[in-house]
C-alpha cells in the first residue's frame, strides 16, 4: 500500500520535473532544433531572382567546392582564428601570472580588467575605427612619435587581418587571463613549496610545474575562444564589412552577405552548415586534447 | 639573505610595472573614446591628437538632435528586458529540474546556440518570420535574443542549485510540498544572488548582441547596436558624435558588469570553469 503510494509520488515528481524543463526544451526545439533542420533542407534549395524556390539537390555544395570566395573565406577565417587565439593565449597566460603575483587585487582593478570584454564588440569596433584611422588616428601618431612608419591598419589588405586580430585580442585577452588566473589559484601550493626546497629557478618551476598543471585550464579557455573566433562577425562587420576588397571576408561574413544582401538563402545555408561543422570539429578536437592533458 | 630579499623586491617591482603596463593598454582605448566624446568638433580630428581641451556636451546634444538615439535606446531596452525576462522564466525551472534530476540534456541542448554561428539560425528565422509577417516586430527580436539569454540563465544557476543541500528538499518533501512549491518557496530564495548574476549577464549579452537585430529589426524597432552602423555611415568628420554614441551604448553593460565582477568569470564560461 505504502509502496504504491511511494511510486505514485515518484511518478508525480517525474512529471513535475518534466513540466519544469518543458518550456525551455520546447523553446529550444522551436527556435534552434527545428530551424537547423529547416536550414539543412534550405541547403538543398535554390532561390531564383524572383524569390521562387525549387529543389537543387547538391548544387549548393558542388558550387561551394568551386567557389573561390568560399576558399578565400575559409583561409581568412583560419588565419584570423590562429593569429587571435595565439595572441590571446600567450598574453592571457602572461597577464594571469602578473595578476596572480600581485596578490591583492582591489575590485576596481578587476572591473577595469573586465571592461573590454563586457562592452559590445560593436563599440570596440567603433572606438578602434577612430583610433586606427590612417590619417588622423592616435595609433599612427604614437607610431610616428617613436620614429616608426604609419600603417593603414584596417584600410590595408595586408594588415587588416592582424589588425582585426589585435582588436579582438584587446577585448578578450583579459577574459582568457581571468580564466587562467582561476586555474592558478586552484593549484595546490604544496607543489611550489616542494620545487622551492629542491632549489628550482622560477623559470624552471613555471616550465616544469605550473604550465603542465595549467594546461587543462588553458585548453578550456582555448575552446571557449575558438567557438567565438571561428564565427567572427561583429567587429569586422562594423569596421570593414569584409573589406578592403574581400581581405577580411570571413566565412560568417560571406555567408551573411550571400543570404541577406544577395538573398541566396539556399547557398548561404550550405555555407553556414559548413562553418558550423568546422566549429564543432574544432571543439571536439580540443575536447580530446583536454582529455590528453588532464591530471 | 639580504640578497634574496633584494631579488624579491625587484621581482615585485617588475611585476608592478607589468601590471601597470597591462592596465594602460587595456584602459587607454576606452579612455580615448570617452575623452573624444567630450571634445569640441574641431579638436576631435585634430592632428596631432590633443589630450588637453575644454570639455563640451555638444556631441551628445548633436547625437540626440540628428539621430533618433533615444528611441533606439528604448528599443534596445524593450528587447533586452523582454529577452532577459523570457530567459529567466524558462531558465529558472529548467536549471532547477536539471540540478535535481541530474538529467542534463535539456541544459546541453540550449548550449547549441552558444556554439553555432548565429547566421545558421538567422537564415531559417528570416524565412519563417517573413512568412508570418513578423520581421521588424519586437516579438521576433525578443524571441531571437532569448536564444542568447536562456543558456546563460541555466548555466549560471546550475551550480547555485547544486549548492543547496539535498536534505533541505527532502525535509520539504516529507512535509508534503510539491516540487513546484519547493522551487518557488524554498530553492529560489536560497539562490537569489545567483538569479541576480544570471539576470545581469543575460542583460549584458542580450544588449551587446548585434547580428539578429541587423536583419530582424526595422526602422521602428532598430536596437542601438544595430543602429551603430548608421552612426558610422554619417561620415568620418562626425567622430565626436560617433564616440558619444559608442560611450552611451557601452555604459549600461559596463556599469552592470562592475556590479557582478566577482562572479563574472565562472558565469561566463557556462560551467566549463569553476571560479
Image (cartoon, helix red, strand yellow):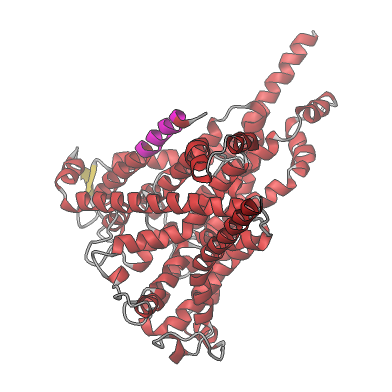
Q: Is residue B179 left or right of residue A244?
A: right
Residue at position x 29%, y 49% in the image: A78
Residue A82 lies, in percent from the top left, at: 33, 49
Above or below: residue A185 compared with residue A22 = below
Query: Residue B107 falls in which quadrant of the image?
Result: top right
A289 within the magenta span: yes
Does the magenta stretch mainly form a helix, a strand or a loop? helix
Q: Is residue A128 left or right of residue A202?
A: left
Vertical placement of A207 versus A291: above or below? Answer: below
Q: Give me the residue at 67% from left, 36% from top.
A: B96
Q: Is residue A27 magenta?
A: no
Rendered residue at 44%/42% (across/down): A223
Q: Hey, which residue is sitting farthest top in the picture? A: A1
User: Does the rendering let one see residue A271?
Assistant: yes
Left/right of residue B193 with respect to residue A55 in the rendered view: right
Q: Position of residue A165 (x, y in %)?
A: 36, 58
The percent position of residue B106, horizontal first and vertical second, equals 55, 33
Please tell me whether residue A66 is drawn above or below residue A143 in the rendered image: above
Out of A57 and A207, give the one closest to the viewer.
A207
* Quarter of the rendering occupied by the C terminus of chain B: top right
Residue at the far left: name it: A66
Q: Which residues are magenta?
A: A281-292
Mark yes or no: residue B223 visible: no
Could you tell whether A237 is left or right of A27 in the image? left
Please provide percent x and percent y for residue B166: 75, 28
Amino acid at each position: 500500500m505504502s509502496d504504491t503510494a511511494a511510486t505514485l509520488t515518484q511518478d508525480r515528481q517525474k512529471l513535475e520535473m518534466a513540466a519544469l524543463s518543458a518550456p525551455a526544451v520546447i523553446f529550444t526545439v522551436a527556435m534552434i532544433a527545428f530551424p537547423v533542420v529547416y536550414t539543412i533542407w534550405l541547403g538543398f534549395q535554390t532561390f531564383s531572382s524572383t524569390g521562387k524556390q525549387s529543389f537543387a539537390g547538391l548544387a549548393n555544395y558542388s558550387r561551394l567546392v568551386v567557389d573561390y570566395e568560399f576558399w578565400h573565406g575559409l583561409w581568412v577565417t583560419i588565419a584570423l582564428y590562429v593569429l587571435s587565439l595565439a595572441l590571446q593565449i600567450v598574453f592571457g597566460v602572461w597577464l594571469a601570472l602578473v595578476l596572480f603575483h600581485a596578490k591583492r587585487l582591489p575590485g576596481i582593478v578587476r572591473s577595469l580588467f573586465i571592461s573590454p570584454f563586457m562592452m559590445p564588440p560593436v563599440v570596440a569596433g567603433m572606438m578602434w575605427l577612430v583610433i586606427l584611422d590612417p590619417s588622423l588616428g592616435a595609433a599612427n601618431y604614437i607610431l610616428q612619435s617613436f620614429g616608426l612608419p604609419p600603417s593603414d591598419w584596417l584600410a590595408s589588405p595586408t594588415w587588416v587581418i592582424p589588425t582585426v586580430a589585435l582588436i579582438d585580442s584587446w577585448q578578450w585577452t583579459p577574459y582568457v587571463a581571468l580564466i587562467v588566473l582561476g586555474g592558478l589559484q586552484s593549484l595546490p601550493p604544496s607543489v611550489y613549496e616542494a620545487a622551492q626546497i629542491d632549489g628550482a629557478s622560477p623559470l624552471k618551476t613555471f616550465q616544469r610545474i605550473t604550465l603542465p598543471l595549467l594546461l587543462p585550464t588553458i585548453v578550456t579557455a582555448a575552446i571557449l575562444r575558438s567557438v567565438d573566433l571561428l564565427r567572427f562577425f561583429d567587429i569586422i562587420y562594423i569596421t570593414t564589412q569584409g573589406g578592403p576588397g574581400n581581405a577580411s571576408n570571413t566565412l560568417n561574413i560571406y555567408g551573411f552577405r550571400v543570404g541577406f544582401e544577395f538573398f541566396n538563402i539556399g547557398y548561404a545555408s550550405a555555407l553556414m552548415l559548413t562553418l558550423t561543422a568546422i566549429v564543432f570539429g574544432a571543439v571536439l578536437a580540443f575536447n580530446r586534447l583536454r582529455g590528453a592533458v588532464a591530471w | 639573505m639580504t640578497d634574496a630579499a633584494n631579488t624579491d623586491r625587484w621581482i615585485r617591482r617588475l611585476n608592478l610595472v607589468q601590471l601597470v603596463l597591462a592596465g594602460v593598454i587595456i584602459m587607454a582605448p576606452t579612455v580615448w573614446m570617452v575623452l573624444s566624446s567630450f571634445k569640441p568638433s574641431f579638436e576631435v580630428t585634430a592632428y596631432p591628437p590633443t589630450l588637453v581641451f575644454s570639455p563640451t556636451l555638444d556631441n551628445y546634444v548633436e547625437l540626440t538632435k540628428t539621430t533618433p538615439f533615444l528611441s533606439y535606446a528604448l528599443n534596445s531596452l524593450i528587447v533586452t528586458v523582454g529577452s532577459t525576462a523570457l530567459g529567466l522564466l524558462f531558465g529558472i525551472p529548467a536549471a532547477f529540474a536539471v540540478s535535481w534530476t541530474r538529467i542534463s540534456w535539456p541544459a546541453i541542448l540550449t548550449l547549441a546556440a552558444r556554439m553555432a554561428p548565429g547566421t545558421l539560425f538567422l537564415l531559417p528565422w528570416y524565412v519563417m518570420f517573413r512568412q508570418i509577417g513578423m520581421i521588424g516586430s519586437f516579438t521576433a527580436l525578443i524571441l531571437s535574443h532569448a536564444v542568447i539569454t536562456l543558456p546563460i540563465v541555466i548555466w549560471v544557476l546550475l551550480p547555485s542549485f547544486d549548492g543547496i543541500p539535498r536534505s533541505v528538499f527532502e525535509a520539504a518533501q516529507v512535509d508534503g510540498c510539491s516540487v513546484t512549491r519547493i522551487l518557488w518557496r524554498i530553492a529560489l530564495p536560497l539562490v537569489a544572488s545567483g538569479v541576480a548574476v544570471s539576470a545581469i549577464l543575460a542583460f549584458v549579452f542580450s544588449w551587446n548582441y548585434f547580428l539578429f537585430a541587423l536583419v530582424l529589426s526595422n526602422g521602428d524597432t532598430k536596437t542601438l547596436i544595430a543602429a551603430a552602423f548608421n552612426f558610422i555611415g554619417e561620415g568620418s568628420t562626425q567622430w565626436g558624435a560617433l564616440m558619444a554614441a559608442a560611450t552611451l551604448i557601452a555604459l549600461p553593460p559596463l556599469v552592470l558588469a562592475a556590479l557582478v565582477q566577482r562572479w563574472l568569470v565562472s558565469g561566463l564560461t557556462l560551467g566549463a570553469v569553476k571560479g
